[in-house]
Amino acid sequence: MISMIWAMDENWLIGKDNVLPWHYPKDLAYFKNKTKNESVLMGDMTYQSLKGYYKTKPLPFKKVYVANIMEATYPDAIHVKDIFSFIKETNEDIFVIGGKTIYKLLLPHADRLYITYVLKRHQGNVYFPSFDLSAFYLIDKKMEDGLIFATYERKKI
């Protein structure tokens, strides 16, 4: 199963200069709860951003895959040069955790979406790619402190 998780504001903003443009402890806790001890896939910039937060501490995931078309070595992650071959061949459940390009490429393959809607506008320069949410149905939703935590599953055809 391919799951995606992200938070976005009312304008679909997801980032500012490779960091989150906001700090909502409930959203961070939600992200950690959903992804802890899971296998995650992210792009190189998201990896670098997370390493900036965690510094010398290990990332809290079972396995870390970093998609990068360039040759790269990651001390605590597995380099994925071709994400389409990777998702076709893997038997693992994967959480896609960013960034914009990885989301855009893998949205057509996502089975489940975990979206945190930030009910406020923020300043930034990276936006989630537009897509048709009608391909999914809502399976869970809760609201807390100006945030909506929504889970969607892809409709079976």
Image (cartoon, helix red, strand yellow):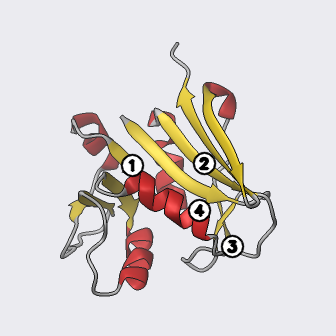
Q: Which comes sooner in the sequence, label 3 or label 1?
A: 1
Q: Which residue is mark 3?
A: 125
* Residues marked 2 and 3 touching at CB (< 8 Å): no
Q: CA distance from mark 3 to mark 1?
A: 24 Å
Expressed as whole percent of the image width and height from the top left, the position of residue 82 reads 29, 51
> Which picture quadrant has residue 128?
bottom right
- Which numbered disc, 3 or 1, marks the residue closer to the eye? 1
Q: Which residue is mark 4?
A: 27
Picture disc at residue 136? none
Mark 2 residue type: Ile
Q: CA distance from mark 2 to mark 4?
A: 10 Å
Give left or right: position of 119 versus 116: right
Q: Dot 2 lies on which element?
A: strand
Q: Which residue is mark 2?
A: 115
Is 5 drawn above or below residue 107 in the view shown? Answer: below
- Which numbered disc, 3 or 4, marks the residue closer to the eye? 4
Tell me the residue at 27%/57% (across/down): 81
Q: Which residue is mark 1?
A: 95
Tell me the residue at 61%/58% (across/down): 7
Of the pair 118 and 103, the residue shown nearer to us? 118
